């Protein structure tokens, strides 16, 4: 069994690769200072994996704590994927390749294995990212926006009266209450951003763009988008599976 672990800024997603098949194991919020506890709660019952592949955007301390737990518990050192100049038919468009979040990179690599046309990969997690890959496999770059939860948090922190609980937008109807206005505002910010980015791509590069959305907020956000968007729930884990197969 190969263990795959995607450490985002809000949640950890884990899956196992069994005979080449990806089987999701767990998706949970976690405490950055308590990785050993998270591992004990979520991984301790597994059979020792033959290999562990990790995507981590939560920093070095988290990585070191995960590594120590895996080595102590299983005598297996996890392999941390880093963004590269090129892999799996995608060429990283960042000037400094390692600066591109590895979750974004893995999403692009996974998308490329399934779609050979021009794609926009939208990561709807803590942050909202949009990355464009042209049909030839060239990553054209991307944009980063605070996710809906972070937009709402910013309003709570900086205003007296807008103290709404974090909610994912469910409609683009104009708000008739503070809660509804804030939810719709974050929805319009995200959906409007996506539409505008795709519009600009069409002007600059023409053609059709296939839109893929991944991340914890994808199922809520995708239906709000007037453009057709495919939800690909496990794109980052699929990118890890690609590395586990190709770089074993
Ligand atoms: N049950 C849930 N628990 C936490 N977040 C959720 C849940 N359902 C949807 N979400 C949304 O998913 C986002 C986290 O998505 P995820 O892809 O796991 O983020 P990250 O990769 O940044 O950790 C949250 O910001 C929230 O908007
Ligand atoms: C943009 C991100 C914060 C998204 O993280 P997430 O929302 O998945 O937790 C992450 O990909 C990251 O830390 N990237 C590094 C900066 C960059 O990609 O340019
Ligand atoms: K994201």
Image (tube, grey):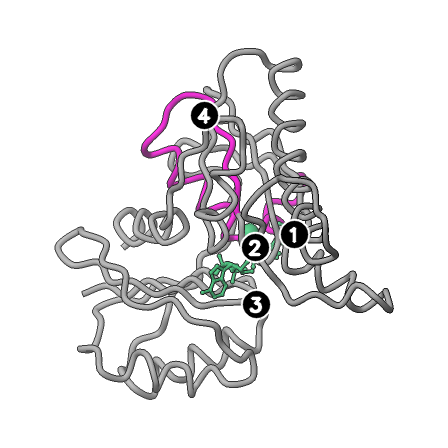
Rendered position, 181 above or below 207: below
Look at discs 4 and 3 and give the one toward the viewer: 4
Q: Nearer the viewer, residue 40 or 92?
A: 40
On the image, which quarter does residue 68 sit in? bottom left
The Cα atoms of the two marked residues, 2 and 1, are separated by 7 Å
* Residue indicated by mark 1: 183
As rendered, which of 158 and 71 lies closer to the eye?
158
User: Please, is residue 181 above or below residue 156 in the view?
Assistant: above
**Mark 2 residue element:** loop
Towards the viewer: 114 or 242: 114
Distance (Cα) linking label 4 and label 3: 29 Å
Q: In screen coordinates, is 47 left or right of 76? A: left
Whole-percent x and y of residue 149? 63, 60
Q: Earlier in the sequence, mark 3 or mark 2?
A: 3
Q: Position of residue 54 (x, y in %)?
A: 40, 63
Residue at the location (66% across, 46% down)?
184
The residue carrying mark 3 is 58
Q: Which residue is mark 4?
A: 210
Magenta span covers which residues? 95-123
Mark 2 touches mark 1? (CB < 8 Å): yes
Q: Residue 72, percent across and down?
A: 34, 88
Q: Are marks 3 and 2 in contact (CB under 8 Å)?
A: no
The answer to whether 156 appears left or right of 11 in the picture is right
Q: Is residue 111 magenta?
A: yes
The number of numbered badges drawn on the structure is: 4
Dot 4 or dot 1: first in sequence order is 1
């Amino acid at each position: 069994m190969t263990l795959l672990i995607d450490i985002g800024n809000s949640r950890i997603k884990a899956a196992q690769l069994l005979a080449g098949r990806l089987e999701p194991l767990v998706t949970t919020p976690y405490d950055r200072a308590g990785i050993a506890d998270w591992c004990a709660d979520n991984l301790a019952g597994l059979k020792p994996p033959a290999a562990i592949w990790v995507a981590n955007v939560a920093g070095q301390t988290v990585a070191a704590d995960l590594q120590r737990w895996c080595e102590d518990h299983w005598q297996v050192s996890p392999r941390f994927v880093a963004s590269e100049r090129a892999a799996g038919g995608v060429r990283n468009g960042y000037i400094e390749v390692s600066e591109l979040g590895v979750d974004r990179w893995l999403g692009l690599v996974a998308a490329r294995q399934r779609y050979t046309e021009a794609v926009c990969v939208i990561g709807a997690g803590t942050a909202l990212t949009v990355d464009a890959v042209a049909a030839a496999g060239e990553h054209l770059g991307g944009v980063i926006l605070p996710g809906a939860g972070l937009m709402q948090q910013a309003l709570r922190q900086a205003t007296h009266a807008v103290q709404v609980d974090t909610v994912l937008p469910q409609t683009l109807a104009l708000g008739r209450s503070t809660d509804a206005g804030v939810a719709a505002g974050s929805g319009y910010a995200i959906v409007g951003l996506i539409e505008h980015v795709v519009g600009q791509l069409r002007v600059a590069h023409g053609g059709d763009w296939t839109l893929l959305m991944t991340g914890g907020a994808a199922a809520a956000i995708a239906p709000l988008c007037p453009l057709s968007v495919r939800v690909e729930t496990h794109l980052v884990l699929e990118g890890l599976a690609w590395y586990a197969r190709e770089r074993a």
